[in-house]
C-alpha cells in the first residue's frame, strides 16, 4: 500500500533540504501498510475512478485524503446543509455550510502546514522522466514493479476514448502526448499489441505517423534513436554567443522558452543519440 510522507526525506539518500523538508511530499510503497478495510477503500476508489475516467478526469486526491483523515481520526460532526429549489438561503444555513467546509479542510492540512495535492494536468511530464532512465540504463533501478503498476494505471486512465492522449488530462488527443505515452509504455515492457498500445499506435498511424509531432517531440525521438536529427526544427546553440544587446538573444526569452531552449540547443548541436533503440 502506498503511503504519503510529509516533510520527510523518505528512503531516498539523494534528497536534501534547506527548509527542513517543509512542503515535501513523497509517496513510498509499503507492502505491509494498511488494514484490509483501508486497502479495500483504496481499491474501491481506484475502481470508481477507472469506471468514470471519461467523465471525471482529475483524481480528486482521494488516496492522500483517506490517509490524512484516518491519521487524524477525523469525524465530520457538523451536519450537511441542503437548500431546496426556491428555498430562502438563510444566514444560519450559510454559516453552517461554511463551518462544515472549514472543519473538513482544516483536517486535510498536513503536519507542516501545507495542503498536499496532485500535480494533475499535463501529460508530457511523466514520459520524458522515463525516457531519461531508459537512456541511462536505470529503468529497473528506478521503477520496480509497484512503481510501474502506478505508471501504467495513470497512463491507461488518461487514454482518450479514440485511443490517443491529450496535452493534458482534459485535452483532445494530439500527436505529441500520444507518441510520448505510447513510447513510455513500450519502454516499461508493455507489448505493441496490448490494448492501450495497439489503440495508441493506430491513432498515430491513422494520422500519418510521428512526422507531425511538434519540435519537443522530434528532439526526444532523435535522442532516443527513433527519429533523425535532420528532421528536427533547427535549434542552433550559437544563438547563446550572440551579443546580449540583441532583442532576439535567448536570455531574453520567457523563462519556459529559455530553460527549454538551453538544453535542447546543446543536444541539437551535439546531435546526441542513444544507440539504436529496439523500439
Image: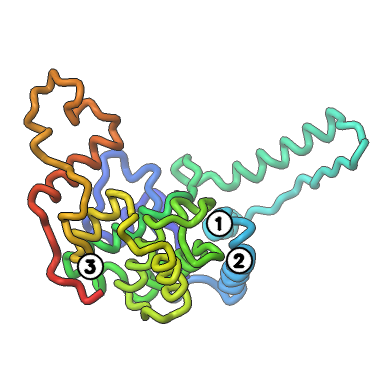
Percent position of residue 181, x then y:
38, 63
Q: Nearer the viewer, residue 161 or 256?
A: 161
Instruction: Give the mark toward the camera: 3 or 1.
Output: 3
Percent position of residue 218, x then y:
26, 55
Residue receiving disc 3: 134
Q: Residue at x 17, y 43 (%)?
A: 235
Say above or below: 88 vs 104: above
Crowd class of label 2 (few under 14; some 14 to 19; many from 20; radius 10 Å): some
Q: Please indicate, yes or no, whether residue 36 appears anywhere in the rendered image.
A: yes
Q: Residue at x 58, y 72 (%)?
A: 43
Q: Residue at x 57, y 57 (%)?
A: 62
Say above or below: 261 vs 175: above
Residue 207 falls in which quadrant of the image? bottom left
How far apart, in angstroms, are the residues tagged by discs 2 and 1? 9 Å
Disc sitting over residue 99 in the figure: none
Secondary structure state at the residue bearing disc 1: loop
Crowd class of label 3 (few under 14; some 14 to 19; many from 20; radius 10 Å): some
Q: Earlier in the sequence, mark 3 or mark 2?
A: 2
Disc sitting over residue 45 in the figure: 2
Q: Nearer the viewer, residue 9 or 168?
A: 168
How far apart, in angstroms, are the residues tagged by discs 3 and 1? 28 Å
Q: Please indicate, yes or no, whether residue 30 appears anywhere in the rendered image.
A: no
Secondary structure state at the residue bearing disc 2: helix
Q: Are marks 3 and 2 in contact (CB under 8 Å)?
A: no
Q: Residue at x 64, y 53 (%)?
A: 74
Say above or below: 175 vs 98: below
Q: Are marks 3 and 1 in contact (CB under 8 Å)?
A: no
Amino acid at each position: 500500500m502506498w503511503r504519503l510522507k510529509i516533510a520527510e526525506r523518505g528512503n531516498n539518500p539523494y534528497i536534501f533540504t534547506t527548509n527542513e523538508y517543509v512542503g515535501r511530499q513523497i509517496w513510498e510503497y509499503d507492502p505491509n501498510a494498511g488494514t484490509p478495510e483501508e486497502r479495500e477503500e483504496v481499491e474501491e476508489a481506484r475502481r470508481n475512478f477507472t469506471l468514470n475516467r471519461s467523465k471525471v478526469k482529475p483524481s480528486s486526491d482521494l488516496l492522500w485524503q483517506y490517509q490524512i483523515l484516518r491519521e487524524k481520526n477525523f469525524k465530520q460532526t457538523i451536519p450537511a446543509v441542503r437548500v431546496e429549489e426556491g428555498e430562502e438561503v438563510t444566514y444560519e444555513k450559510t454559516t453552517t455550510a461554511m463551518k462544515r467546509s472549514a472543519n473538513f479542510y482544516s483536517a486535510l492540512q498536513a503536519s507542516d502546514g501545507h495542503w498536499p495535492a496532485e500535480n494533475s494536468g499535463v501529460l508530457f511530464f511523466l514520459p520524458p522522466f522515463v525516457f531519461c532512465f531508459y537512456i541511462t540504463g536505470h529503468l529497473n533501478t528506478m521503477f520496480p514493479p509497484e512503481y510501474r503498476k502506478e505508471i501504467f494505471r495513470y497512463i491507461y486512465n488518461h487514454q482518450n476514448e479514440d485511443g490517443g492522449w491529450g496535452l493534458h488530462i482534459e485535452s483532445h488527443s494530439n500527436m505529441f502526448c500520444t507518441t510520448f505515452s505510447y513510447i513510455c509504455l513500450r519502454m516499461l515492457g508493455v507489448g505493441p499489441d496490448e490494448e492501450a498500445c495497439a489503440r495508441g499506435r493506430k491513432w498515430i498511424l491513422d494520422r500519418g505517423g510521428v512526422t507531425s509531432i511538434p519540435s519537443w517531440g522530434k528532439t526526444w525521438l532523435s535522442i532516443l534513436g527513433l527519429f533523425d536529427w535532420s528532421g528536427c526544427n533547427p535549434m542552433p546553440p550559437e544563438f547563446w554567443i550572440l551579443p546580449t544587446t540583441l532583442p532576439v538573444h535567448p536570455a531574453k526569452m520567457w523563462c519556459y522558452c529559455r530553460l527549454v531552449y538551453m538544453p535542447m540547443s546543446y543536444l541539437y548541436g551535439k546531435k546526441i543519440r542513444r544507440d539504436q533503440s529496439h523500439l
